[in-house]
Image: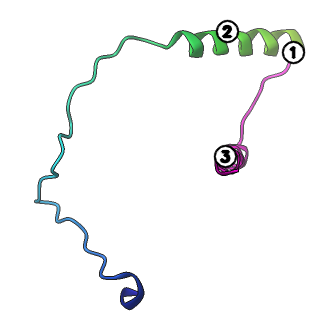
Amino acid sequence: MEKKYGKWDLQKKEDKPAYPVNYKVASFGEDNDIESSMKSLEQAEKSLNKKWVVTKDQLVQSAVDLHLEKSA
């Protein structure tokens, strides 16, 4: 594979990256859209008397679907 793609040269752990890392990021709390979505989900679950449980397979499939939509 190296002949085809070249040598895989990983950065040594003691080398510092050329970009800043481990810096503080301000937290402004939960986004309004997320808060609204969570409230909507709660109301839907209550009215339908059913809890929405997402499995790992569904998350993976959603990611695949999103990727396919973007590339189409």
Mark 3 lies on a secondary structure that is helix
Q: How many discs mark residues in the rendered view?
A: 3
Mark 1 lies on a secondary structure that is loop
- On whether residue 62 falls in the magenta region, the answer is yes
Disc 3: CA contacts within 10 A as few (<14), some (14-19) or many (>=20)? few
Q: Position of residue 53 (x, y in %)?
A: 74, 32
Mark 2 lies on a secondary structure that is helix
Q: Position of residue 60 (x, y in %)?
A: 66, 49
Magenta residues, dominant SS class:
helix
Q: Position of residue 13 (x, y in %)?
A: 17, 61
Q: Would you say the residues marked 1 and 3 are in contact, meaning their CB atoms lie under 8 Å apart?
A: no
Q: Which residue is mark 3?
A: 56
Name the amino acid, label 1: Asn
Name the amino acid, label 2: Lys
Q: Mark 1 or mark 3, which is nearer to you?
A: 3
Disc 2: CA contacts within 10 A as few (<14), some (14-19) or many (>=20)? few
Disc 1: CA contacts within 10 A as few (<14), some (14-19) or many (>=20)? few
Q: Which residue is mark 1?
A: 49
